[in-house]
Image (cartoon, rainbow, N blue to C red):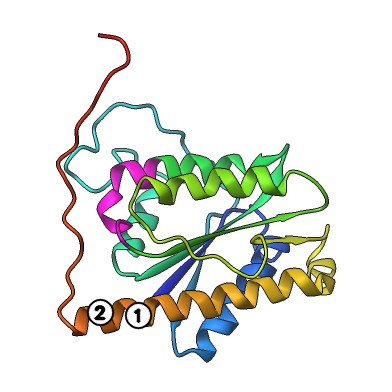
Amino acid sequence: MKVLLVNGSPRVNGCTFTALTEIAETLKKENIETEIFQLGNKPIRDCIACGGCNGKNKCVFDDDVANSLIAKAAECDGFVFGSPVYYAHPSGRILSVLDRAFYAGKASFTHKPAAAIVSARRGGSAASYDVLNKYFGITQMPIVSSSYWNMVYGSSAEQVKQDAEGMQTMRNIGRNMAWILKCIEAGKAAGISLPQTEASERTNFIR
């Protein structure tokens, strides 16, 4: 079993990375393989709703990390998506890549458990956390929770490490993720198959 942890911060070793690392270390103790996927600081395209990805499980734009994320996601069993808080919302780069990855590569994520985490100096964390969870809610992904809201506080990696409650929350995410993955594995071994999804029914408000 493997969990992909996505760092939506342009800072490779900053606050978000520190929180994700705490989760990864906990997962390793539960014998779960992990990988931290860095979105980095290079430009990331926004979705332009061209529809060119339909039926391809990849975005037509192949000049940034979106398709790499989709490919890695296909090989993983669970996810943690982390973002810093910018103006009371997640980073623009993680929103741009998730818009494209979840639309073009939906099959790589469906029915796999996921958690969202956010890091903030002070405010905007609850709103940012809510935004990231919306991706899971429409992709039939079990949402992994913790003992408190999935967030840490600090303006540097060192300060995040001092957030005792936040770091404890990260460790509990790791334990809950491991538990859910093991339950899913046990269910498959017992012959329990994935639920059948009804064909898409689109109802427009304006006819």
Q: Position of residue 164 (x, y in %)?
A: 80, 75
Instruction: Identify which residue, 106 or 125, lies in the foreground.
Output: 125
Q: Position of residue 201 (x, y in %)?
A: 19, 32
Q: How many C-alpha atoms fall within 10 Å of the one at disc 2: few (<14), some, or many (≥20)?
A: few
Q: Is residue 105 magenta?
A: yes
Q: Position of residue 152 (x, y in %)?
A: 73, 62
Q: Position of residue 114 (x, y in %)?
A: 45, 62
Query: Relative to 21, is 95 on the left or the right?
Result: left
Q: Is residue 174 magenta?
A: no
- Secondary structure type for disc 1: helix
Q: What residue is shown with label 1?
A: 183
Instruction: Identify which residue, 44 or 170, lies in the foreground.
Output: 170
The structure residue drawn at horizontal position 33% and vertical position 57%, both measured from the top left corner, is: 109
Q: Are marks 2 and 1 in contact (CB under 8 Å)?
A: yes
Label ID, residue 187? 2
Given the image, on which type of amino acid does mark 1 rest?
Answer: Cys
Q: Quadrant of the N terminus?
A: bottom left
Instruction: Identify which residue, 178 or 24, lies in the foreground.
Output: 178
Q: Which residues are magenta?
A: 100-111
Q: Quadrant of the C terminus?
A: top left
The structure residue drawn at horizontal position 19% and vertical position 84%, both measured from the top left corner, is: 190
